[in-house]
């Protein structure tokens, strides 16, 4: 198959009761497509299937006609798949469905179709092959009928669901009543095809389908609707909602958009409609234009087991679970989910199996920046963004082991991290932190120009992380390969020692010296900030640390009190003062550092030691005070500080009598 | 034991010579321990203050107690004092027993400065100082002791509240060893 985007958009969703400012987290259907792709990949390795061809087909078109019974579970369907072989060695593919369904017939003109069925509860899949084999480049329409009664059972440790609900609102995802197609040779590979869908559903039910509406006719007790999804990708999940649905139009946006909600459950839906023009305006600026859908629907889901929401073709599903903390948080998550229409739906990366940089990474980038621009445009940008990104740092450093968490681009052949914590931190927080590292290195204009260039290059394209690197390099006209290599392809965490010697108190001009020392060979962009005792910025500038140790001299109008590295870079840079224990970076280890550490004694980065989760981090935990980097400020950190007490920024130890100490 | 009679004979002579020399060549820098006394700058009548409440000069040693008043929910003290390392040698800082929770402290001399930090964890709620000791500084004074001062570097000294912010309006008052 061609590599055009990839599978189910991996949208995790928040659990109820989230703290304000906390990030989205796993809890929804999860990366189901990746999980199922892993299943068939491993099964092929464990036991060669009966159909032994190394398949390689393009899915050009999927025509589906699905009848859904009055019980919401009975399915009778026909799928006509237009496929074209693109290799001489094979022609097979997989079809996934609910295991309550069964394949009934399969045929194609000029060849016979074989379907080998396997179960992977609660799913089943068929390996579809041809006899005689198709020739390379041959196109054939495969007609497959299937039906039965949906089981709609939970799957996986998080008990995600691909169909469920009740009579008032039910949901159906691909791999339930709609086939999920995978390449035989490359189950992780992407698809790009035209979707045509005919639905026959109970006449009394409203529908929401992730496709553009074509026609809607009621025939007796049946409602017959026709839908079309041009350029549908495997990053788009074909989702159907049925039930009793009400609509709130969103005025003044392009494309026409609406908020829908279950009848009788309108809470917050009006707010969502009010927020959407702001979100659209922000995303249009970010991506360079409006969404190229016929319409966009945001559906406010009630809290439903196994389906807190997702995003797909022109449609966003967002659960009431997000409303339980603050409205600003709900708005932020709405921005995150709507941004996925770009980041993962329209621009579906070809290497989603190996990276979430341009899906979740960009969605987190979008939600943070949206909130900053909407509510805090006049505040210091770094301060606002760091108030968000410090969560990334805490999760990366302390909820996971950054040394073992895989790189942002997984090595070929490896799969997403296994545990929920690792998966979310890797996909959401490490990825977005790297994007922010790029943003600081490139500057605001260059970074956001590069994002727009990415949209141009990669919507309905075949972009991988290599392409993202090229787009950023060409757009910003600076070298970024070393950053992608060190921080995306490898897991680099650079220890950085900062020595600071301010000018003499009465020096004119005031020339202060900053010495940076690193151990890693990669050239590091480091944004240095010199400020006075009141925090007034005297100098800010980017330096490129290529040698292992470099001195930088800065002339300022007044005497600086401290020199620090932009904290947004300190997710990947572990910055220490050359004066051991100088936690406030004023160039010496003194009583202020001591008191700061003492006050924090006992503070833990992750409060739940036994069973740490995504929401257990202490957002006020100051990593600068954790001198031994063990996730707690304790006597061990005080010992480091005590040993350095009196040291100065040039690295010289204090002299004279030393004494004191803890009682 | 053959040397003992000689020593017994010579010692009084040596002592006499020493006393004579001292009497004939007065050293203006020299001050007897009996003629020097610790004197602290008194804080004003009002306002939060850090000051020396007591001080004692004994042969070869100066002990001065830092105290604070008008301060509540104190998280810690970051203090810096200037002294003359040619005359005094900093020995140690001892937190006062008046603290109701065990404070952690660190102190060091660097050149003519004594850097001092003392504090308690924020979870304790901090400490009130209505006029109570913070801790005691100990200096060694080479003989003969000399007059010198011990002053707070006010720009680098602060009382920190339990939330980590410097408490405004605190005045700092030093002291000195001088002739009475």
Image (spheres, helix red, strand yellow):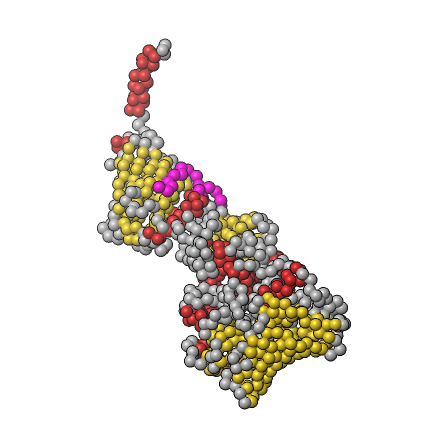
Can you give x and y, in whole percent of width and height, for residue A453 in the image? Answer: 61, 70
Q: How many marks?
A: 0
* Residue at x 25%, y 48% (from the top left corner): B131
Q: Nearer the viewer, residue B166 or B84?
A: B166
Above or below residue A88? Residue B58 is above
Dividing the image into 4 quarters, which one contains the C terminus of chain B?
A: top left
Q: Who is closer to the viewer here, A397 or A78?
A: A78
Seen in the picture, residue A225 relative to A569 is either above or below; the reply is: below
Q: Can residue A163 be seen from the camera position used here?
A: yes
Image height of A389 relative to A319, above or below = above
Q: Residue at x 30, y 19 (%)?
A: B15
Horizontally, residue A652 falls left or right of residue B128, namely right
* Quadrant of res A476: bottom right
Q: Which region shows up in magenta? A: A643-663
Q: Residue furthest top?
A: B2
Any magenta on residue A406?
Answer: no
Q: Position of residue A13 (x, y in %)?
A: 49, 68
**Image-based side of A240 in relation to A638, left or right:** right
Q: Main secondary structure of the magenta part?
A: loop
Where does the image place residue A198, in percent across and percent down from the top left? 60, 82
In the displayed structure image, the side of residue A303 where residue A444 appears, left or right: right
Residue A129 appears at what percent x and percent y? 70, 71
The image quarter containing residue A478 is bottom right
Q: Quadrant of the N terminus of chain B?
A: top left
Nearer the observer, B179 or A187: A187
Residue A535 visible in the current orientation: no
Question: Residue B171 versus residue A613: which sits nearer the camera?
Answer: A613
Give the residue drawn at x 71%, y 74%: A113
Residue A645 magenta-highlighted: yes
Residue at image coords 55%, 86% = A222
């Amino acid at each position: 198959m061609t590599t055009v985007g990839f599978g189910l958009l991996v949208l995790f969703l928040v659990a109820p009761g989230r703290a304000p400012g906390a990030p989205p987290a796993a809890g929804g259907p999860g990366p189901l497509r990746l999980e199922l792709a892993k299943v068939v990949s491993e099964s092929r390795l464990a036991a060669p299937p009966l159909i032994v061809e190394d398949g390689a087909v393009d899915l050009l078109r999927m025509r589906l006609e699905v009848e859904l019974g009055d019980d919401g579970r009975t399915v009778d369907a026909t799928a006509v798949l237009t496929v074209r072989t693109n290799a001489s060695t094979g022609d097979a593919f997989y079809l996934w469905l609910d295991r309550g369904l069964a394949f009934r017939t399969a045929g194609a003109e000029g060849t016979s179709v074989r379907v080998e069925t396997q179960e992977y509860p609660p799913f089943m899949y068929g390996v579809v092959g041809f006899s005689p084999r198709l020739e390379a480049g041959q196109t054939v329409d495969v007609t497959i009928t299937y039906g039965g009664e949906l089981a709609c059972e939970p799957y996986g440790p998080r008990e995600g669901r691909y169909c469920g609900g009740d009579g008032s609102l039910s949901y159906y995802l691909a791999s339930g009543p709609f086939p999920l197609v995978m390449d035989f040779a490359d189950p992780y590979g992407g698809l790009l095809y035209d979707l045509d869908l005919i639905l026959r559903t109970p006449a009394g039910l409203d529908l929401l389908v992730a496709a553009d509406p074509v026609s809607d006719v009621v025939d007796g007790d049946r409602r017959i609707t026709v839908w079309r999804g041009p350029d549908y990708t495997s990053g788009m999940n074909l989702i159907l909602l049925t039930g009793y649905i009400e609509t709130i139009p969103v005025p003044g946006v392009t494309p026409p958009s609406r908020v829908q909600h279950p009848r009788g459950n309108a809470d917050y839906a009006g707010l969502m409609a009010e927020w959407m023009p702001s979100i659209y305006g922000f995303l249009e600026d970010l991506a360079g234009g409006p969404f190229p859908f016929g319409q966009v629907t945001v559906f406010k889901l009630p809290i439903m087991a196994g389906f807190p929401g997702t995003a797909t073709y022109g449609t966003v599903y967002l659960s009431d679970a997000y409303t339980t903390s603050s409205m600003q948080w709900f708005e932020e998550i709405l921005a995150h989910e709507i941004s996925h229409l770009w980041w993962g739906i329209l621009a579906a990366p070809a290497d989603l199996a190996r990276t979430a940089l341009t899906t979740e990474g960009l969605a987190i980038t979008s939600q943070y920046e949206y909130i900053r621009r909407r509510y805090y445009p006049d505040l210091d940008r770094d301060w606002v963004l760091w108030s968000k990104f410090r969560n990334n740092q805490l999760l990366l450093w302390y909820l996971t082991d950054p040394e073992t968490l895989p790189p942002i681009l997984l090595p070929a052949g490896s799969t997403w991290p296994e545990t929920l914590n690792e998966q979310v931190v890797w996909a959401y927080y490490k990825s977005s932190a790297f994007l922010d590292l790029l943003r600081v290195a490139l500057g605001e204009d260059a970074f956001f120009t590069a994002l727009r260039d990415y949209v141009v290059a990669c919507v309905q394209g075949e972009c991988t992380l290599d392409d993202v690197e090229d787009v950023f390099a060409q757009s910003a006209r600076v070298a970024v390969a070393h950053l992608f290599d060190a921080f995306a392809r490898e897991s680099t965490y650079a220890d950085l020692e900062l020595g600071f010697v301010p000018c003499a108190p009465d020096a004119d001009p005031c020339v202060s010296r900053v010495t940076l020392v690193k151990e890693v060979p990669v050239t590091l962009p480091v944004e240095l900030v010199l400020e006075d005792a009141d925090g007034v910025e005297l100098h800010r500038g980017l330096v490129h640390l290529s040698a292992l140790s470099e001195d930088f001299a800065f002339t300022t109008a007044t005497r600086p009190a401290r020199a620090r590295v932009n904290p947004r870079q300190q997710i990947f840079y572990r910055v220490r003062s050359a004066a051991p224990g100088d936690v406030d970076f004023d160039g010496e280890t003194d009583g202020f550092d001591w008191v700061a550490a003492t006050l924090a004694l006992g503070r833990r980065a992750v409060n739940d030691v036994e069973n740490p989760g995504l929401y257990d981090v202490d957002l006020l935990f100051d990593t600068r005070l954790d001198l031994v980097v063990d996730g707690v400020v304790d006597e061990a950190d005080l010992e480091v500080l005590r040993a350095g007490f009196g040291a100065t920024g040039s690295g010289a130890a204090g002299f004279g009598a030393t004494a004191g100490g803890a009682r | 034991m053959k040397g003992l009679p000689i020593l017994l004979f010579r010692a009084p002579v040596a002592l006499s010579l020493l006393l004579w020399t001292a009497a004939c060549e007065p050293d203006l820098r020299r001050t007897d321990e009996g003629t020097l006394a610790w004197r602290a700058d008194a804080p004003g009548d009002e306002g939060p203050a850090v000051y020396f409440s007591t001080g004692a000069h004994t042969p070869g040693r100066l002990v001065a107690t830092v105290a604070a008043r008008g301060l509540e929910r104190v998280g810690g003290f970051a203090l810096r004092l200037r002294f003359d390392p040619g005359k005094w040698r900093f020995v140690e800082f001892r937190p006062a027993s008046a603290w109701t929770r065990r404070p952690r402290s660190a102190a060091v001399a660097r050149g003519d400065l004594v850097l001092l930090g003392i504090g308690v964890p924020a979870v304790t709620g901090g400490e009130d100082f209505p006029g109570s000791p913070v801790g005691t500084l100990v200096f060694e004074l080479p003989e003969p002791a000399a007059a010198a001062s011990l002053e707070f570097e006010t720009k680098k000294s602060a009382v920190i509240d339990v939330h980590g912010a410097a408490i405004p309006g605190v005045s700092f008052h030093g002291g000195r060893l001088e002739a009475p």
